[in-house]
Image (tube, grey):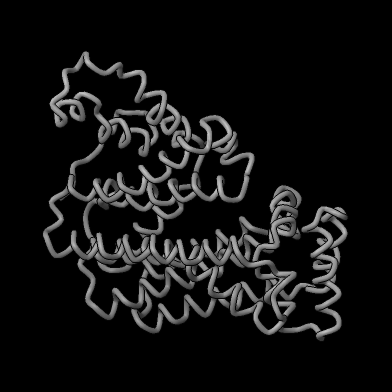
Amino acid sequence: MTQALPSCDERPPLVRLLDEESGIDRLLSSLGVARDALPRELLDAALLAPLREFLARPSKQFRLHLVESAWRLAGGRGRFPADVALAVELLHAGSLVIDDIQDGSESRRGGPALHRTLGEPLAINAGNWLYFLAERLLRQFDLGAAIELELRRSMTDSVLRCHYGQALDLACRMSALAQRQVPGVVRATTHLKTGSLMELSTRMGALLAGAEPNALVAIGEFGASLGVGLQMLDDLSGLYSERCRHKGEEDLLQGRPTWPWAILAETLSALEFSRLQQRAREVEQGRVNAEPLLEALRVALAGQGQARANEHLQHALAALRTQLGSSREMDRVAADVARLVKSYV
């Protein structure tokens, strides 16, 4: 069903894909341009070489593994079509490049953010190019017209929803929202940004396995819920994990809609919450250091965050088990979720 990438090739899968799909000779031929008419080093320096380095950086490729888990849950047999599933990783990589520009981030995956080395204009072009490469990838496989169409529709819907979420994430400031608005804004932003791409991952796996309609819906909804739960843990890690402390400080400096704020908006009195918001405004304005506010949020949460995230994830697993029943694959998914939770603690 799929064209396998060479097993003896030691390049990371996304780098191999990049090299195979971006042949300069083929591009020039399609334009009717002679091979020696365009110095290939120009295009390589402006696009391909920077992306090759970026895609080679260490990555868990969690979304790729999630596609496989969903494929097996939906009854997939034989060899998992991993090459097709790389489309999700391409979309994610493209979103990271663009997000880093919009957030003014300095680093990504152990190296400088792409716009720091390539410049913003070329980095924007490279991130967008990865979106379209993901679409192009689907042409390489004999998926059948119906499945390919549904995959394309799912990818488009996912990226569109991610952009809604990014708009909220960039525009909203926790210090400026009414307390009653905060939980809804955080929940919507998380569903749209993180949940959408995770839902695409599980939906893609189920589609590739030929899942029945009810199973397809249940597996897709599980992916979205999983994304929300993991984002809860990621937001909380900025408060509790020393290695992620820089992220917590960055979230406060930019006033991002995060889950600590959502939980506290539902549990604190109006006076207590307004005092935290006032301190948040001072941090956003650069008048004070973020660390005292991080400590104040930790004290106010009093351990509620981890319990809330765990409860959400267990509910997502229970809903999936109710729809699909118990199985060895279901147990594997539950074990994977448990390992993920530990990685955030």
| Residue 278 shown left or right of residue 315 in the figure | right
Q: Residue 311 location, x and y as percent?
A: 60, 78
The residue lying at 48 percent from left, 73 percent from top is: 225
Using the image as rendered, state which of residue 245 and residue 40 is in the foreground: 40
Q: In which quarter of the image is residue 203?
A: bottom left
| Residue 307 shown left or right of residue 210 in the figure | right
Q: Residue 138 location, x and y as percent?
A: 22, 50
The residue lying at 28 percent from left, 33 percent from top is: 7
The residue lying at 30 percent from left, 61 percent from top is: 205
Using the image as rendered, state which of residue 127 and residue 247 is in the foreground: 127
Is residue 332 among the parts visible in the rendering?
A: no
Q: Residue 104 location, x and y as percent?
A: 62, 46
Q: Look at the picture and state if 83 lies above or below 173.
A: above
Q: Look at the picture and state if 138 lies above or below 48.
A: below
Is residue 178 among the parts visible in the rendering?
A: yes
Using the image as rendered, state which of residue 309 and residue 40 is in the foreground: 40
Q: Look at the picture and state if 52 lies above or below 315.
A: above
Residue sticking out furthest to the top: 36
The residue lying at 73 percent from left, 76 percent from top is: 304
Q: In which quarter of the image is residue 145?
A: bottom left
Q: Residue 35 location, x and y as percent?
A: 19, 17
| Residue 177 shown left or right of residue 330 in the figure | right
How many badges with numbers are in the image? 0
Query: Considering the image in quadrants, where does the C terminus appear?
Result: bottom right
| Residue 10 shown left or right of residue 236 in the figure | left
